[in-house]
Amino acid sequence: MNKKMPPQQRLHLVFGGELKKPGSAIDFRDVSKLDIVGLFPDYATAYSAWKSAAQSTVDSAHTRYFILHIHHLLEPEPEPEPEQKEEKEEKESEIHS
């Protein structure tokens, strides 16, 4: 029996707010005024919500929106064994060469 598993839910949080100084470190002017757009079950819907929110504030250079990959916080990828890490780094350097 080959049952098809439903896709794994990968939660994403879309939020934004006014930054103290655009173009520098992410430092919000007032954290209590952050706009929490919502939680989304996948990147595509999160991106759509982010784009809509970001476009609605296009005239405010200080306002920025972000997509936070909650699924990375809930289930972080395990650290590779040292041998695997070295192999991965070697492959990546070959790709970029």
Image (spheres, grey):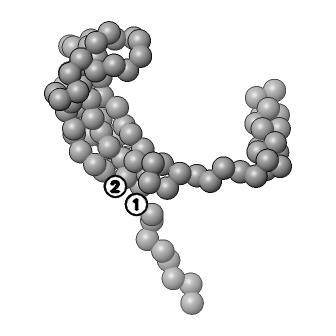
What secondary structure is found at the residue carrying circle 1? Answer: loop
Which residue is situated farthest in the left direction here? 33
Residue 96 position in % (x across, y down)? 76, 29
Residue 52 left/right relative to 2? left
- Residue positioned 28% across, 21% down in the render: 28
Residue 5 left/right relative to 28? right
Q: CA distance from mark 2 to mark 1?
A: 6 Å
Q: Amino acid at mark 2?
A: Pro
- Residue positioned 27% across, 35% down in the render: 15
As drawn, the label of residue 41 is 2
What secondary structure is found at the residue carrying circle 2? Answer: loop
Residue 1 sits in quarter: bottom right
Looking at the picture, does residue 31 appear above or below residue 89? Answer: above
As drawn, the label of residue 9 is 1
Question: How busy is the neighbourhood of tag 2: few (under 14 within 10 Å), some, or many (20 plus)?
Answer: some
Residue 27 position in % (x across, y down)? 33, 19
Residue 66 sits in quarter: top left
Q: Amino acid at mark 1?
A: Gln
Q: What is the quadrant of the C terminus in the image?
A: top right
Looking at the picture, does residue 5 appear above or below residue 17? Answer: below
Residue 41 sits in quarter: bottom left
* Residue 42 can be seen in this image: no
- Residue positioned 26% across, 29% down in the render: 16
As drawn, the label of residue 64 is none
Instruction: Check if mark 2's residue and mark 1's residue have beta carbons within 8 Å.
Output: yes
